Amino acid sequence: MGVRFNVRVTMQAAASTPRVETRQQSQLLALLRDEGPLAKVELGERLELPRARLATEIAKLFEWNLVESGGPAASRGGRRSTLVKLADDLRFLAADIGATSIGVAVTDARCEVLAHIVEDYDIRKGPVSVLERLTQLSGKVLGEVTGRVIGAGVGLPGPVSFRDGMPVAPPIMPGWDRFPVRDRLASAWGCPVTVDNDVNVMALGERHAGVARSLNELIFVKVGTGIGCGIVLGGRVYRGVAGTAGDIGHIKLDDYGPACACGEVGCLEAYFGGAALARDALTLARSGRSMFLADLLAHKGELAASDVASAASAGDFAAANLVREGGRRLGHVVASLVSFLNPGMVVIGGGVSRLGHQLLAEVRSAVYRRSLPLATGNLPIVLSELGEMAGVIGAAWSATDHAFAATGSGSVG
């Protein structure tokens, strides 16, 4: 474990930004993040704080350079109040590490993306190589902006102990088991870091900035190389006791199905993950059942899940049948979740979601047919609005939650 990263990102050390001390300060910061500049009088009303107490809490945040004046507020009659806003120079790093790519962004304190970069990179190269490249890419995006980075958030494509900041026995991440990702990145970046499962941060992104904006109960299903589900209940990500809630990709559908990366057989992911689609596309091409895919294979030398989407869109029957069967199986699992959790929305994202409305139609059909009418009567099942940005926006939100939380209180959102 005595690994040293060659690249160190220069930024303000976490110790130079005092931790938020009280629940009221935490609520103030979260409110300003969620809604933008607010008048002092409105802040007092929203948080039900006496004027003197509010002034004390705001003065502390001014002293720590976390907030600043936004000028005079609109008149409500009488003396004008003053607007308070989050400091313009606050910055957060956000990283979305997928099975085959690394995305890095810098955001402001309201999680608006200021700079973003995505690069293909194989998670199987191991934690040392991947995190080394991540720090290099973060240096690039930080070079495009100015400001003080006071926190960072990272999403990983496997089971994560949120408390410990490390992956635990991730099926598609060889060499990553219990690697101290949070501590290594906190050392390299010089700021507090949160580490979570990628689908959890995607759910946060959609909940705060995407199609599920402000919904307190939702399910986000990621269909990529792997399949996972982010569950938001009461406005918070539900992770379960050990952080494995929503690991639907390894729900067994058939005792005699195809082998899965987790070591079992017949898992949903083994039928409909990105690797499974690429495998089945290759079979269709080599058997001659799909001339479209056979031509692509001859031209490219390999096939990916995206090629199935292209073939299905072109009217290829065999490829369209793959989408129908995969969507049906996914829909059966989602239907069980809908009946159990009764969410306000189901959002489908990830690379395989580019199969688009063909996939969506199959999932909707299965869910509406198999779930209780009371649960599905007003249930939208939609594609992600944020696409590949969902992960970095959600990771930034997780970082702000941590940065704005009162000492010892944990997350505020």
Image: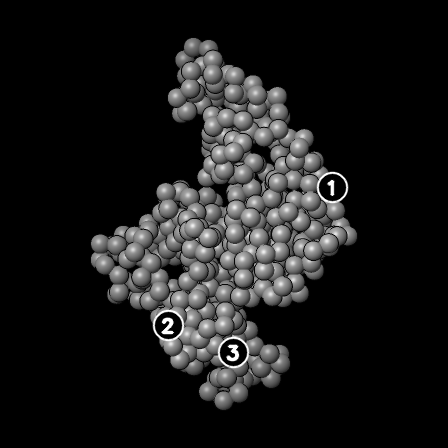
Tag shown at residue 279: 3
Kindly indicate whether the residue at mark 3 contacts the one at mark 1 (C-beta within 8 angstroms): no
Looking at the image, is mark 2 or mark 3 earlier in the sequence? 2
Nearer the camera: disc 2 or disc 3: 2
Looking at the image, is mark 1 or mark 2 earlier in the sequence? 1
Q: Report helix, strand or loop for mark 1.
A: loop
* Pick the front one: 18 or 43: 18
The answer to whether one can see residue 27 in this image is yes
* Pick the front one: 104 or 258: 258
Residue 1 falls left or right of residue 308 = right
Label 3 amino acid?
A: Arg
Q: Residue at x 69, y 44 (%)?
A: 187
Q: Which residue is mark 1?
A: 10
* Pick the front one: 128 or 71: 128
* Pick the front one: 262 or 347: 262
**Is 111 above or below relative to 272?**
above
Residue 326 is situated, as x and y percent measured from the top left of the image, at 40, 72
Q: Residue at x 57, y 21 (%)?
A: 60
**Is 207 above or below relative to 118?**
above
Looking at the image, is mark 1 or mark 3 earlier in the sequence? 1
Label 2 amino acid?
A: Leu
